[in-house]
Amino acid sequence: MPESRSICFLPSGEMLRLQPVGHWLQRFAEFTQRSAQEIVLPAVGFSGPLFSSVVHPAPLTYKRNNLLPQWVADSRDGLGDDGVVWGSIIVEMGFLNNEALWLTDQFGDSLPQVCLVNPTVQEIIGDLIGEVIGSGVDGIVLDITDAYPNSSAPGRLGYILHCFCDFCMQALKLKGFNESREAFIKEPLLSQLILHTAQEDGGGVEHIDPPQEWLDGRDVSNLIALAIARRFVPEDAENLQSVASRLLAYMRARVAVTADAVRTTLAPARAAGRRTAVVLGDHKADLSQMVTLAALDQAKSADEYWLPFAPGRNLTPGDWRAVQFLAGRSTYYFNAFFETVETASMRLVVGGIEFFLQDLLRSSKSLMNNKLGAGSVYASGKLKQFEGFAGVPLSQDDHIKLVEHLTSAVTGDVLPPDLLKRFRIATETPTSNDSDEASIV
């Protein structure tokens, strides 16, 4: 039986501004009690490409000699001749700052994030993939854990949901969904069956993620029962059967559209003979990724998929290959934290220091979803549906250093110790002499 794969995942260049590649490989070994065989380096983040690119300049905060090409070389040295180096691309790209590429909600308003279904976006990502490959990586990782943000909004009926740009509407029709985007305005139950404002979580949005079999079988009974049980909708709401059927028809079309978009986007990597992987938050129709493992497998979108949980092949048959990502919703919460870090200057100007610090603290707490540790790694090796595991070796001490470095950079002074304690949200940090699994951030 082949050895289980071990993948060190670095979600943001901010980690490599703080410490070199070797530090994170050592941290990974301390947390997992085994050496990394593969590493994922940040190639395109929230602030732009982390290399010299014709698409967009690298962030000015990075030294020109500490970018992707140097990280690749350092990774080769750290991993050895058999090591595998990946470059990751986060599907967000607000740095392109062009409204013609943005998502469009059902109200017709733009959201400052690109739509993966847009052919121009696919072409631009293809250009970036070519440049990343030129840095010497073995594979491309496409992170789609937040490809379709969704939320409530003041003065809106229902919830802002996914994208209804002209490209999406045309693609949805080709997959059999013929309703207009206005359906999600006139009939708010379409979104309220799967989205709900959490009263105990500061107004965050709870969600229901239907599995592919519910979409294929138009399983309205299970969807309605779950929505009522979780108090998303009242039991006596009118037309629940019809609304649920229409919603499942939309979602079945949407996951197929997303799977096709991912396959097209990664085509340049395949053409160059590089490996391809997709980071998912769930095997089901997670509303922020709006695709399923089954839909991706059917479309042959990538070589493999990295996600926290995958059912056995008897429940989700197919040729899919999976790696277990040891974090809740994979990179979703890491990305939320590092987006706050990488866009600190803008957030400080827009919201002020107090708003920024509250945002940083809130996103810091979400890092408790990290599950990387010796115990979880050992258990992963027993799960036959996975070829190995991936995880982010971010310790409490490293997290505090990131916050200190950030506050010094954006405010001119490091936060006082009593305030920094608010960011100390985890227990013991593992060291080379401590093999016990710890709760980490």
Image: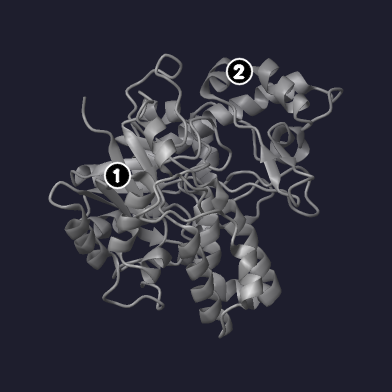
User: Residue 433 appears at what percent x and percent y?
Assistant: 36, 54
User: Residue 254 appears at what percent x and percent y?
Assistant: 53, 34
- The reply to whether residue 177 is visible in this rendering is no
As helix, strand or loop, the secondary structure at mark 1 comes to loop
- Asked whether disc 1 touches disc 2, contact meaning CB atoms under 8 Å apart, the reply is no
Neighbor class of circle 2 (other Cα within 10 Å; few <14, some 14-19, many 20+) is some
Q: Nearer the viewer, residue 389 or 428?
A: 428
Q: Is residue 8 left or right of residue 402?
A: left
Q: Amino acid at mark 2?
A: Arg
- The reply to whether residue 60 is visible in this rendering is yes
Q: Amino acid at mark 1?
A: Arg
Q: Where 253 sits versus 402, above or below?
A: above
Question: Which label sits in the foreground, 1 or 2?
Answer: 1
As helix, strand or loop, the secondary structure at mark 2 comes to loop
Residue tagged 2: 218
User: Residue 202 appears at what percent x and percent y?
Assistant: 75, 52
x 51%, y 80%: residue: 409
- Name the image quarter holding residue 209: top right
Q: Where 332 sits versus 409, above or below?
A: above
Give the farthest residue toward the front. Answer: 433
x 46%, y 57%: residue: 395
Q: Where 240 sits versus 410, above or below?
A: above
Name the disc covering residue 176, or none: none
The span from disc 1 to disc 2 (Cα, nearest Å) is 45 Å
Residue tagged 1: 34
User: Residue 177 appears at what percent x and percent y?
Assistant: 57, 29
x 30%, y 56%: residue: 25
Give the farthest residue toward the right. Answer: 236
- Name the image quarter holding residue 314: top left
- Name the image quarter holding residue 261: top left
Task: Answer with mark 1 or mark 2, whichever residue precedes in sequence.
Answer: 1
Question: Which color mode does the image show?
Answer: one colour
